[in-house]
Image (cartoon, rainbow, N blue to C red):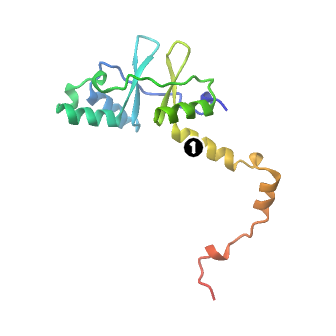
Amino acid sequence: MRVDQIMTKQVNSCSPDNTLAEAAQLMWDHDCGCLPVCTGNGASRVTGVITDRDICMSALFKGKPLSELRVSDAMSRQLQACRPSDSLADAEKTMRQARIRRLPVVDEQGSLVGMISLADLAREAARENTSPSRRSPRQRWAIRSRPSASPLLSSSPPE
């Protein structure tokens, strides 16, 4: 399976010139903990990412209000990204090696086309593991031959 099959396609982003208050408000409004940081008119070229943790740590250590700090002061510039055509295994490997949970998806020009998260990968793995077509004949037999109720899980007390 490929990244473009499970990635989030409508992604909010911010600019390096935005304040941390604006980035935090975007995260709050869209219930996310990470924003790609993009530059350019028209095509959004990804130059980094900023997380809710980056915002908190910057505010704490710089001792200024979020409205006085810029995204460029707190964002991660070591961009890790993947392509829409990459395999899920490749995306997972990139996340594992970089120790990150979210990955921007960019096209050949470096423009933002989506985001993929560790949660997306976990959901897909769970879906694959529970799909009846993915089970071996032995697994299907084992499921059919299970008793309908286990005496160990019964809600009534033993007699």
Quadrant in which the C terminus is drawn = bottom right
State the image coordinates of residue 57 (x, y, percent, origin top left).
Answer: 27, 36
Q: Is residue 37 left or right of residue 9?
A: left
Q: Is residue 22 left or right of residue 9?
A: left
As drawn, which residue projects farthest toward the top? 41
Q: Is residue 98 left or right of residue 83?
A: left
As drawn, which residue projects farthest toward the left? 63
State the image coordinates of residue 15 (x, y, percent, origin top left).
Answer: 35, 20
Where is residue 63, by image quadrant? Answer: top left
Q: Secondary structure at mark 1?
A: helix
Name the residue tied to disc 1.
122
Check disc 1: other Cα within 10 Å, few if <14, some if 14-19, many if 20+: few
Where is residue 70, by image quadrant? Answer: top left
Where is residue 128, by image quadrant? Answer: top right
Q: Residue at x 28, y 37 (%)?
A: 56
Q: Is residue 12 left or right of residue 67?
A: right
Q: Residue at x 45, y 11 (%)?
A: 42
State the image coordinates of residue 110 (x, y, percent, origin top left).
Answer: 50, 15
Q: Residue at x 52, y 12 (%)?
A: 109
Q: Residue at x 37, y 23 (%)?
A: 14
As drawn, which residue projects farthest toward the front? 97
Quadrant in which the N terminus is drawn = top right
- Name the amino acid type tagged 1: Ala
Q: Is residue 54 above or below residue 71?
A: below
Q: How many marks?
A: 1
**For this rendering, which residue is in front, 105 or 23?**
105
